[in-house]
Image: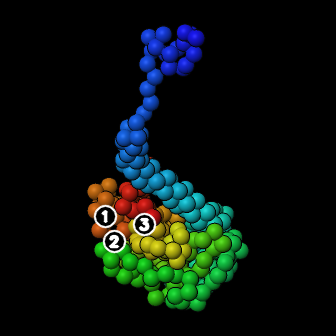
């Protein structure tokens, strides 16, 4: 009869009105959400990728540091067992001290292109990793190429790689690509340089000033790993791969 049987009637009796979003309002809301997502998602992805890169770089450096420490008698870096700064020295050090401690996927001949991708610096100039280097790839995807230097060459190595030496021991220069043949294969992004000497394993640029490191990392890339360490592992977005 005269009761408020409909839902609309009950709402009116209570002084309420029933409303719903129109299609236009829904579309506007979705559009706003889309704009916000488009603005924030790239930053989120970049941050995640940056953290992944940092984790990979830390692991690579830690592994190599431990391997180098175990390659010297009694942990004394002054007794680096490098017989000379030539091809024989590279082969001997690798076979006797590195190969037994690393999980090697592939070892290539001196100067082979099968284990090391062509590398360029940040100015797009091709990087020479040495004429007597030995490249190899580990099972976790890292690519390395190593070159030995005689003790008397310490001034050349120091000038080139920004680390001071006493000249008491031979040295090993290591180029490391954190993701092997995968791009970008650029110095200071996925390729980094370290020197193993009487001071242990150090990133290139260790004895340079912050200003020198910042400038070199931006223009070329040799000192970028040292820069990241000093900056508490904050990697600029343009250097994240």
Percent across and percent down for residue 239 are: 39, 62
Dot 2: element? loop
How far is mark 1 from mark 3, CA to CA?
A: 11 Å
Percent across and percent down for residue 53 are: 50, 59
Mark 2 vs 3: CB contact within 8 A: yes
- Looking at marks 2 and 3 on the same chain, the residue that comes earlier in the sequence is marked by 2
What residue is disc 1 on? 218
What residue is disc 3 on? 189
Q: Residue at x 36, y 74 (%)?
A: 121
- Looking at marks 2 and 1 on the same chain, the residue that comes earlier in the sequence is marked by 2
How far is mark 2 from mark 3, CA to CA?
A: 9 Å
What residue is disc 2 on? 122
Label 2 crowd bin: few (<14), some (14–19), many (20+), radius 10 Å: many
Residue closer to the observer: 33 or 67 = 33
User: Compared to 199, does 153 lie above or below?
Assistant: below
How far is mark 2 from mark 1, CA to CA?
A: 7 Å
Residue closer to the observer: 158 or 216 = 216
């Amino acid at each position: 009869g005269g009761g408020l049987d409909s839902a609309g009637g009950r709402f009116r009796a209570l002084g309420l009105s029933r409303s719903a979003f129109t299609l236009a309002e829904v579309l506007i809301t979705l559009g706003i959400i889309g704009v916000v997502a488009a603005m924030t998602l790239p930053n989120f992805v970049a941050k995640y990728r940056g953290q992944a890169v940092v984790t990979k770089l830390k692991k690579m450096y830690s592994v190599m540091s431990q391997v180098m420490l175990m390659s010297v008698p009694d942990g004394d870096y002054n007794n680096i067992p490098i017989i000379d700064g030539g091809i024989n020295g590279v082969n001997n050090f690798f076979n006797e001290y590195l190969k037994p401690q690393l999980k090697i996927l592939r070892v290539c001949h001196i100067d082979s292109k099968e284990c090391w991708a062509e590398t360029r610096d940040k100015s797009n100039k091709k990087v020479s990793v040495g004429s007597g280097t030995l490249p190899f790839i580990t099972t976790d995807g890292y690519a390395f190429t190593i070159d030995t230097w005689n003790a008397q060459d310490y001034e050349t190595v120091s000038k080139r790689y920004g680390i001071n030496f006493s000249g008491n021991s031979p040295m090993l220069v290591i180029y490391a690509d954190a993701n092997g043949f995968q791009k970008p294969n650029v110095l200071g992004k996925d390729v980094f340089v370290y020197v193993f000497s009487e001071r242990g394993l150090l990133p290139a640029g260790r004895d340079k000033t912050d200003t020198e490191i910042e400038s070199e990392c931006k223009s070329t890339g040799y000192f970028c790993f040292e820069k990241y360490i000093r900056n508490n592992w904050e990697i600029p977005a343009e250097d994240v791969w």
